[in-house]
Image (cartoon, rainbow, N blue to C red):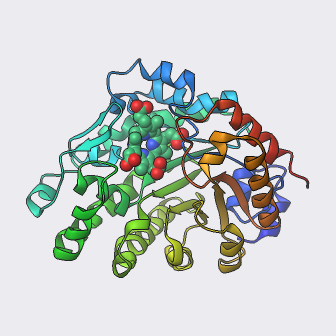
Amino acid sequence: MNGMLGNDLGCSMKPLLEALRGGTPWPPPVWLMRQAGRYLPEYRALRTKAQSFIHFCLTPELAIEATLQPIRRFPLDAAILFADILLVPHALGQEVAFVANEGPKLVPIRDAAALARLSTASFAETLAPVMETIKGVRAELPDDVALIGFAGAPWTVATYMIEGEGGSDFENIRGVAYREPGFFAALLDRLVEATSAYLILQGDGGAEALQLFDSWAGVVPASLFESAVIAPTARIVGAVRAAHPEIPIIGFPRGAGSHLKTYVEQTGVDAVGIDFMTSLARVRNEVPESVALQGNLDPVLLRDGGAAMANETRGILASMHGHPFIFNLGHGVLQTTPPEHVAELLNLVQGARK
Ligand code: 1CP
C-alpha cells in the first residue's frame, strides 16, 4: 500500500497500523519484543498466581493482566498478546513443560509414528482461552494502542518439537531435515496448518496485526532455507490474508542475513523485523518502499541504558526517517533490564524530531 494513504489517514489511525500499511508517522511507533515478562516486578508477582506457565498463558484473567502491565507503565504504541509460541505443540498434544530457570522441555518428536500421535481434535478448544484474552485486552486498551497477536514460524517451533528443549545446538533437527525429508516436510505441513488456523482465530478475536517469530531462522542450512522458512511462511501469510485481508503480518526471521531480501520478496509479509546483527540502512535499500521495517536496538543497550543506548537509538532513527518504520529491539527485552531504561528509551524515540 502506498505511503500517501497512510499519511492521509494518520490522524485517525493507530500509529502502529499506519506504519504497517506503508505510512511514515514520525516519531515512529514503538513497542518491544518481550515487553511483558520477568524484568517487571509486577509480572513476577502475577506469575506466582499460576501453578504452571502454560496454565498462566491459558488463563485469560492472568494473561490479560500480563499483556496490559507494560502498557500501564509505558507509553507504548502496541501491546503484544501474552502467550507463547509453544502453545501450538501443546494444543496438538505434544507434552510441553516450562521448567523454572531451565526453559521449555518437550517430549521430542523425531519420527512418523510420534508425528501421527499429534491431533487437531482439541486444538481450537485448547486455544480458545487465547481468544478470550484478546477480547479482554481489546476492551481495555487505549484508543491509539494496537494489539499484536503472534505465533512461532514452523521452523522455529519445529526446533523445540524435535530437539525437546531450548538452547540446543540444533543437531537433531538439522540431521532429521537432511536425512528424512519426507518426515520433516510432513511436520512442517502440520505446523503450517495449525499456525494458520491459530492466527486466523487470533484475527477473529480482534488481533490488529500478527507477528511470526522465526527466532532460529539463523541456524537453517542454506540449502533448506527456501523449504524450511520461506515456503511455510508464504503459505501461512496466504492463508491468513485470505481470511483477514485487513490484518498486516510482520515476519521476524532472526539471523536470516543474506536471505532477508528473498524472505521479504517471497513470503509477502507486510513488514519485517530486523535483528541487531543486520544494518537497517542496508535493508532499507534492498526492500520495496512499501514494506515496513521494525527493529533493531541491541537489547544489551537497553539493559545498560545511558549514552551508548542514546547514540545507537539516534543512529537508528536517522537511518529510518521517511521509510515506514516501527522502533523495536533486535530481539527480546533481557530479564536483567531495569524498567527505568525502557522509560528512558521511549523518551528518546518519542522525542525524535519531526
Ligand atoms: O516463567 C516465565 O515467566 C517464563 C518466561 C516466558 C515468557 C514471559 C516464556 C517461556 N515465554 C514468555 C512469553 C512470551 N514468549 C511472549 C509474550 C510476552 C511479550 O512478548 O511481551 C512471546 C511473544 C513469546 C515468544 C517466544 N517464546 C519466542 C519467540 C521470541 C524470542 O524470544 O525469540 C520463543 C523462542 C519462545 C520460547 C520460549 N518460551 C519461554 C522461554 C524461556 C523460551 C525461550 C527458550 C530458548 O531460549 O530457547
Residue 189: image quadrant is bottom left
> Where is the C terminus found, in terms of image quarters?
bottom right
Decide which of 94, 249 is in the foreground and name it.
Answer: 94
Is residue 15 toward the left or the right of residue 184 in the image?
right
Decide which of 240, 332 is in the foreground and name it.
Answer: 332
Residue 238, above or below 210: below
Residue 231: image quadrant is bottom left
Decide which of 153, 127 is in the foreground and name it.
Answer: 153
Q: Position of residue 222 (x, y in %)?
A: 38, 79
Q: Where is residue 19 in the image (x, y as percent from the top left)?
A: 72, 59
Q: Where is residue 156 in the image (x, y as percent from the top left)?
A: 37, 58
Q: Within the displayed image, which quadrant is ligand 1 positioned in?
A: top left
- Total residue callouts: 0
Decide which of 131, 102 is in the foreground and name it.
Answer: 102
Residue 296 appearing in the image: yes
| Residue at 48% in and 57% down | 212
| Residue, far left | 113
| Residue at 21% in and 69% down | 175
Q: Where is residue 276 in the image (x, y as percent from the top left)?
A: 60, 60
Residue 81 appearing in the image: no
> Where is the N terminus found, in terms of image quarters?
bottom right
Residue 8: image quadrant is bottom right
| Residue at 35% in and 63% down | 155
Is residue 196 toward the left or the right of residue 45 in the image?
left
| Residue, far right | 354
Is residue 111 toward the left or the right of residue 140 in the image?
left
